[in-house]
Image (cartoon, rainbow, N blue to C red):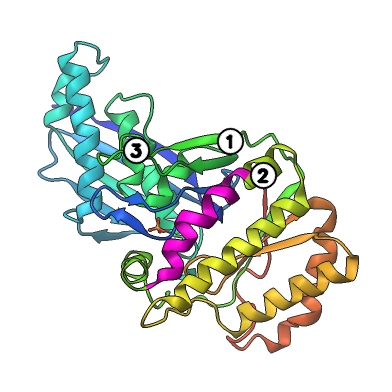
Amino acid sequence: TMEKHNIVTCTAPVNIAVIKYWGKRNEELILPINSSLSVTLHQDQLKTTTTVATSRSFQEDQIWLNGKEEDITHPRLQSCLREIRRLARKRRNDGDSPLDPSILSQKVHICSVNNFPTAAGLASSAAGFACLVYTLARVFGIEGELSGIARQGSGSACRSMYGGFVQWIMGQKDDGKDSLAQQVEPETHWPDLRILVLVASAEKKSVGSTSGMQTSVQTSCLLMHRAESVVPGRMEEMIEAVRGKNFAAFADLTMKDSNQFHATCLDTYPPIFYLNSVSQQVINLVHRFNRHYGETRLAYTFDAGPNAVIYTLQQHVPEFVQAVQHFFPPERNGGQFIQGLPVNQAALS
Ligand code: PMV
């Protein structure tokens, strides 16, 4: 007999925060201690592609990441699956689902691949969970607000549910219903903005974001000061810089916020070091470059790893690439200097 299969494939891009999320007030629901803001990359740059299939013949839910089967009982994966099925059941009970109701009793097989090295420590969970939730929603016929579900997979994933400039509003409620992502400006807003990734190390990060955040919340008093007294004002300034396409303001805030995030890591006890000597050299290079031109033309930002993400405008890309090649000549690439994807240019439009 012919089995009826349901198969959907979607892609979701990585996002790079310019106001960082670091620290949860609720671990299970993934509710942050501060709001954050990021830029979502273009679909054909760094992205995850996920295929979800359902079938009566599947015996259990299963997931493969980059070709290797992973543990489906992972609690955050389970949160996403449970929430999607709950919404699907609700739609069916409301008599409002276009789908074959038997799909709710079927198991899913999930296949997810990244088009960039997962080991490079680039934000892979953000694109991964955003893509998973979006694809599952399509399979189960769910529309509307999905960032609250993606958030329960990985906090930063909620921001990859939208393109362009996206804020994750921390929210006030204990149930997390108001802790959602919202587009500030669409991807067409600032066409000459560019993102470049400098891979300083392809090694896996030493301390994952989940345990790093826990230790920071428990031990760093700088972190609470940042969340309560610094980020709220910075979010407003950042939104204004984005709306006005004010690159210098955008870049200065981006660098200060990255530095403060890494300062809270150093203030964590025992301290967490995500930046290495190459990261420090990139920071110095960016400040020298900006000083040389007498204006802020570049911004760096670092997540939970040593790889630099550079924001600049299209017209400054050639000079910056030249400076990188001058200060990090290819023959010195012995694992110490920039290697792998040396300059990965991501267009925004
Ligand atoms: O969503 P997570 O748990 O991978 O945390 C991401 C944290 C940072 O990348 C360091 C900052 C951010 O806002 O993306």
Asked if 243 appears above or below 224 in the picture, the reply is above
Q: Which residue is mark 3?
A: 148
Report the front residue among 15 and 38: 38
The magenta-colored residue range is 220-236
**Does the magenta segment cover residue 227?**
yes
**Amino acid carrying mark 2 in the image:** Leu
Asked if 259 appears above or below 346 in the picture, the reply is below
Asked if 275 appears above or below 250 in the picture, the reply is below
Left or right, residue 248 beside residue 164: right
Report the front residue among 105 and 133: 133
- Position of the C terminus, as image quadrant, is top right
Q: Secondary structure at mark 2?
A: loop
Q: Secondary structure at mark 1?
A: strand
Report the front residue among 333 and 292: 292
Q: How far apart in space, not on screen, are marks 3 and 1 (Cα)?
A: 17 Å
**Amino acid carrying mark 1 in the image:** Val
Q: How far apart in space, not on screen, are marks 3 and 2 (Cα)?
A: 25 Å
Residue 349 visible within the image:
no
Q: Secondary structure at mark 3?
A: helix
Image quadrant in which you'd find residue 244:
top right
Q: Which residue is mark 1?
A: 184
Residue 177: x, y in percent? 31, 34
Q: Residue at x 63, y 41 (%)?
A: 239
Q: Earlier in the sequence, mark 3 or mark 2?
A: 3
**Does the magenta segment cover residue 296?**
no
Residue 154: x, y in percent? 35, 52
Image quadrant in which you'd find residue 191:
top right
